[in-house]
Image (cartoon, rainbow, N blue to C red):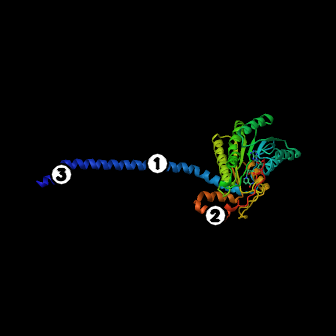
Amino acid sequence: MSEIFLQPSNESFASSFDASTAILYFLDILRMIIFLLWALAFFEQLRSFLVVLPFLLYYWVEGMVKAFLPLGILPRKSVNGDLVLITGAGSGLGRLLAIEFGKLGSRLVLWDINEKWNSETKEILRKQGVEAHAYTVDLSDRKQIYEQAEKVKNDVGDIDILINNAGIVSGKKLFDCPDVLMEKTMAVNTIALFFTAKAFLPSMLARNRGHVVTIASMAGKAGVAGLVDYCASKFGAVGFSESLRAEVLSLQKDVEVTTVCPYYINTGMFDGVATYSPNVLPILEPEYVVDRIVEAVLTNQPELYLPRFSYLVAAIRGMIPTKAADVLANYYGVNKTMDHFVGRPKTG
Ligand SMILES: NC(=O)c1ccc[n+]([C@@H]2O[C@H](COP(=O)([O-])OP(=O)(O)OC[C@H]3O[C@@H](n4cnc5c(N)ncnc54)[C@H](O)[C@@H]3O)[C@@H](O)[C@H]2O)c1
């Protein structure tokens, strides 16, 4: 009697065996199919990656070599006769850039909020026999940018090279900085870039030639104490310039985009800052910076970091954990650099 209950009938045993075996077979086949699909996808990815790998390595090496070459070795394009618009042309880098492009035969359009400084730059250029046109523009005012851009196009013509150079710094810590000053910093250093590009880039794209240069900063690659608003605005400028380059690349036009990220420069804008690692991160001389910027434009260099040690800073910053980066920043004294900042007197 008990055997009857304990022993399953042969028939039901056979059918349950068949069903479970079939399920196991089915699962095995499914697993094999998934594995095959995964292997195919993996090898397809590997194959397509192997196609780009040589280009990746080539441009990596090319970029490193170019970054460390002395000036004047790479072939240069001509900017003779080009119309170059420089924002913030009334002083510092802007004025020096105008003088250098003037020497190369370019015609200059000078934009600055400070009429006096700007006309001084124009006078210097005129004395050197360079064609120069000065416009008073407040870059924190979108309307003024578009109005003056139209005026430039009507008075002088289409811009070939746009150099977004104007910039301001409050030099105040977050809670000491008035809101309006922070808004102004973002407006001049970042938001104005949208409008100058929208005003002048379309004609470059239509003519399939041109160059947009943005003077950002190393403060756009790594945060620094005492520069919260400035760093935010320069991170924005770097983001703007990199994305603009990607958009222009996707349009397959011969328009170049260059992002410039210098460390502190002795122009007056950052008077009072100190460096605690003068060998690797010195305060730069404006003439040196301008020579490198002009070279970057003439050789269509997409990125320029100054001094060269900054390439290493940016690479390491992207690879190591934040707390390890803190140790390095403290070692190089980066977060103390703004402690005695004075800056230049108000530009008006
Ligand atoms: N000096 C540095 O240490 C340093 C370091 C890295 C990056 N930068 C960047 O380089 C660029 C040039 O700096 P610089 O040292 O020659 O400064 P600068 O102060 O000598 O020149 C800036 C110019 O921009 C003009 N400007 C300011 N606000 C303006 C506005 N609202 N509209 C129009 N023009 C305006 C000023 O009148 C001035 O002529 C800036 O973008 C700056 O952020 C400077």
Q: Dot 3: within a 10 Å radius of its alpha carbon, few (fewer than 14), some, or many (20 or more) residues?
A: few
In this view, the mark in front (2 or 3): 2
Residue farthest to the left? 1
The local secondary structure at tag 2 comes to: helix
The local secondary structure at tag 3 comes to: loop
Q: Are marks 3 and 1 in contact (CB under 8 Å)?
A: no
Image side of residue 226 versus residue 5, left or right: right
Question: Foreground: 247 or 343?
Answer: 343
Identify the disc placed on residue 328. 2
Residue farthest to the top? 154
Q: Would you name the residue on which mark 1 appears?
A: 40
Q: Give the distance between the C-alpha atoms of the residues marked 1 and 2, in whole angstroms.
A: 44 Å
Quarter location, residue 332? bottom right
Identify whether 283 is placed above or below 190. below
- For marks 1 and 2 on the same chain, the one whose residue lies earlier in the sequence: 1
Q: Would you name the residue on which mark 3 appears?
A: 8
The local secondary structure at tag 1 comes to: helix
Q: Give the distance between the C-alpha atoms of the residues marked 2 and 3, in whole angstroms.
A: 75 Å
